[in-house]
Image (cartoon, rainbow, N blue to C red):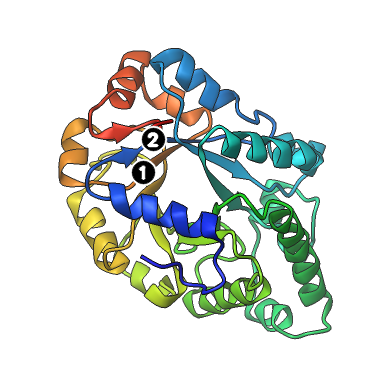
């Protein structure tokens, strides 16, 4: 249960120990809050259910007024909110939709975060001195500086998620994604407050090609949204991810439709994280109250 990096902070080690201690016993509740909402979705869940989600999800951002949801102007407030959430006893999960280094930030969502990335672009990204490499490095380092300013806050970091899909610039190319994973881990090697979470999209066959290996991940998760005509949480997907996780905590890292009590009995996810307003669109208030008050889920740290 030790973090993959030997320089992990005492806070990061303690968080990982906690996640292992509740594994198989509880599913932690969580909610992602887009930057323009800050913590309003989590607060709304508390208003409806009486429980504040234990996992507080956030995003570093990439845009401007073109996509205000993820506007970089909110970053100072974001850092303040991360500190506040940590002090309140919540677990911070940070997502990173990095702007495509062909355009840099701020950029739109599509094109911007979603845009083609060719083999020649990958070559340029991994070649020191090229404009693509310099843009990628500058923006990654900016995030690294922010994480360093939060050195006492353990952060579950889930960069370049849904890489087994082809909608983000970093997706759909397993060998190149693995190079990118190594590159950002190397860039952040001095940050002891990070726990590294690998989070693909729906774990279709072939997701294994994108897995960096147990030595390079602290946590494993998957993003699952309903698809018409399909069971939302097929056991096959959970079993495939559990096989990759090798006993490490396994999360339902993004979702809209809450897992049922029956789902949780056969799929003991370490946590679930609803995505901003989608959780309210996919579930009635009654369903939210039922899920957040299920005896299998945990919304407050013991003693908190």
Q: Residue at x 65, y 28 (%)?
A: 37
Res. 31 mark: none
**Alpha-carbon distance for marks 2 and 1?**
6 Å
Quadrant of the snapshot with the N terminus: bottom left
Q: Secondary structure at mark 2?
A: loop
Question: Is residue 138 visible to us here?
Answer: yes
Question: Is residue 71 visible to us here?
Answer: no
Q: Marks 1 and 2: in contact by CB < 8 Å?
A: yes
Q: Residue at x 36, y 35 (%)?
A: 302
The answer to which image quadrant residue 283 occupies is top left
Q: Residue at x 59, y 59 (%)?
A: 193
Q: Secondary structure at mark 1?
A: loop
- Earlier sequence position, callout 2 versus callout 1: 2
Quadrant of the snapshot with the C terminus: top left
| Front residue of 102 and 156 | 156
Q: Is residue 39 above or below residue 145?
A: above
Please state the horizontal and vertical placement of residue 24, each as a whole percent of the image: 22, 48
Please state the horizontal and vertical placement of residue 254, each as a whole percent of the image: 43, 44
Tell me the residue that label 1 is attached to: 271
| Front residue of 218 and 8 | 8
Q: Is residue 145 above or below residue 131?
A: above
Mark 2 Cα shell of 10 Å, populated few (<14), some (14-19), many (≥20): many
User: Is residue 114 found left or right of 288 in the rendered image?
Assistant: right
Mark 1 Cα shell of 10 Å, populated few (<14), some (14-19), many (≥20): many
Q: Is residue 297 above or below residue 10?
A: above
Tell me the residue that label 2 is attached to: 29
């Amino acid at each position: 249960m030790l973090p993959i990096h030997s320089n992990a902070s005492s806070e990061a080690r303690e968080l990982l120990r906690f996640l292992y201690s509740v594994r198989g016993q509880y599913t932690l509740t969580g909610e992602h809050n887009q930057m323009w909402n800050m913590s309003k979705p989590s607060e709304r869940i508390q208003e409806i259910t009486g429980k504040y989600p234990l996992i507080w999800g956030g995003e570093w951002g990439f845009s401007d007024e073109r996509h205000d949801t993820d506007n970089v102007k909110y970053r100072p407030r974001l850092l303040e909110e991360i500190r506040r959430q940590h002090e309140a006893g919540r677990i911070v999960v940070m997502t990173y939709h990095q702007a495509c280094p062909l355009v840099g930030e701020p950029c739109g969502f599509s094109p911007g975060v979603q845009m083609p990335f060719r083999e020649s672009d990958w070559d340029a990204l991994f070649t020191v001195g090229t404009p693509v490499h310099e843009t990628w490095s500058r923006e990654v380092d900016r995030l690294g500086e922010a994480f360093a300013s939060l050195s006492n806050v353990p952060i579950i970091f889930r960069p370049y998620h849904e890489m087994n899909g082809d909608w983000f610039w970093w997706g759909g190319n397993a060998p190149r994604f693995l190079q990118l994973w190594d590159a950002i881990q190397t860039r952040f090697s001095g940050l002891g407050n990070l726990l590294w979470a690998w989070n693909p999209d729906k774990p279709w066959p072939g997701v294994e090609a994108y897995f960096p290996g147990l030595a390079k991940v602290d946590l494993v998760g998957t993003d699952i949204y309903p698809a018409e005509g399909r069971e939302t949480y097929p056991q096959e997907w959970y079993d495939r991810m559990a096989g990759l996780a090798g006993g490490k905590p396994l999360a339902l890292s993004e979702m809209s439709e809450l897992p049922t009590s029956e789902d949780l009995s056969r799929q003991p996810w370490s946590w679930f994280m609803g995505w901003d307003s989608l959780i309210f669109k996919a579930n009635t208030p009654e369903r939210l109250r039922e899920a957040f008050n299920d005896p299998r889920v945990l919304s407050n740290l013991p003693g908190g």
